[in-house]
Amino acid sequence: MTDEEHLRILEEKAAELRRLAQENGLDLSAELAILEQKIAELKRTVCEGLSAWGRVQLARRPDRPSGLSFAQALCDAFYELRGDRAISDDPALRGGVAKLAGKRIAILFHQRGMTPEEQRQARFGMASAQGYWKAKRIMEIAARLKLPLLTLINTPGAYPGVQAEAHNIAGAIACCIWQMLRHPGPTVAVILGEGGSGGAVALAAADRVLMLENATYSVISPEGAASILWKDAKFAPQAAENLKLTARDLWALGVVDEVIPEPPGGAHTDLQKTVAAVREAVIHHFSELSRLSLDELLRLRYNRYRHVGSAGAPN
């Protein structure tokens, strides 16, 4: 029996005990406590032993916390800004101004949608050109107000449709990267789930890049890489290993600055704990960055991206 099968059986037993306790008025708290401890330990073991491909699957879970619900839970207050002032509003990439730990910030995040209808409208977080032009507008507002900028990333990549190309999505992504690189204040990016291609990079050119431990960040999907290298998407698990797309791999390479632990079993098992861990990390990094002068902030940012991917880049 695999650990995953054992875990499923234990979870079914726990659910049955809760049902019996509720229906019959029984006190099964002691038995449940022992069972839940075993479940937590097994979840931790399963997650620690996950392959790169296993983490890709975990990062793609539709119930993984991200988007609007995550931003609202993370921030003390949030006021959304809509529209790119040229074409329309894109529901896949949203943002506005917010308060975090009593301080004003600007925030941008991908919205994948929770229901099938929301997911269809948001294209599972694949923002079109309108989304990135809107992101640029919010970045410019943040720059004028000298607000710290926080981005929450969870996207397979930018939307590759004809209309996106017609509205210059490549130019919009490039403008977002340029705007982040010259932002006159601290910037922090957090990869919550999938960090796919230019759609993720557009929001990840930050002073500090953080990742949840089961998130992924890559220039191409494992399926895409497998189709190019082996002419067959079935080699996606092998491609995932070679891409070095996991949080631990990217931390070792110096691409990300901190790996944020997830609750046992993954971020989807406990939204409150996941939000608390992200909040603590974000506040810590903003606090460190806020002590730097603008000249020092820009110098460190320049050095970071001149040497990105080289562990131990010069300060």
Image (cartoon, rainbow, N blue to C red):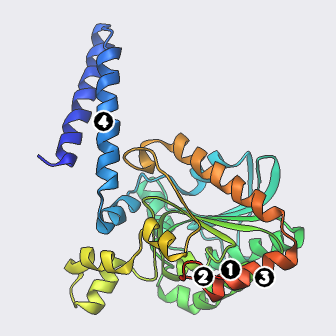
Q: Residue at x 70, y 54 (%)?
A: 284
Q: Which residue is mark 3?
A: 299
Residue at the disc numbered 1: 133
* Marks 3 and 1, the one that precedes in the sequence: 1
Q: Amino acid at mark 3?
A: Arg
Return the residue at label 2.
Answer: 129
| CA–CA distance in space, label 4 to label 2 | 44 Å
In the image, which is nearer the foreground, mark 4 or mark 1? 4
Where residue 242 appears, as percent x and y from the top left, is 32, 80
Q: Residues within 10 Å of mark 3 (few under 14, many from 20)?
A: few
Label 2 residue SS: helix
Residue at position x 77%, y 57% from top? 287
Tell me the SS state at disc 1.
helix
**Amino acid on which the number 4 mark rests in the picture:** Ile
Q: Residues within 10 Å of mark 4 (few under 14, many from 20)?
A: many
Query: Is residue 97 in sight in this rendering?
Result: no
The Cα–Cα distance between marks 4 and 1, rounded to whole angstroms, is 45 Å
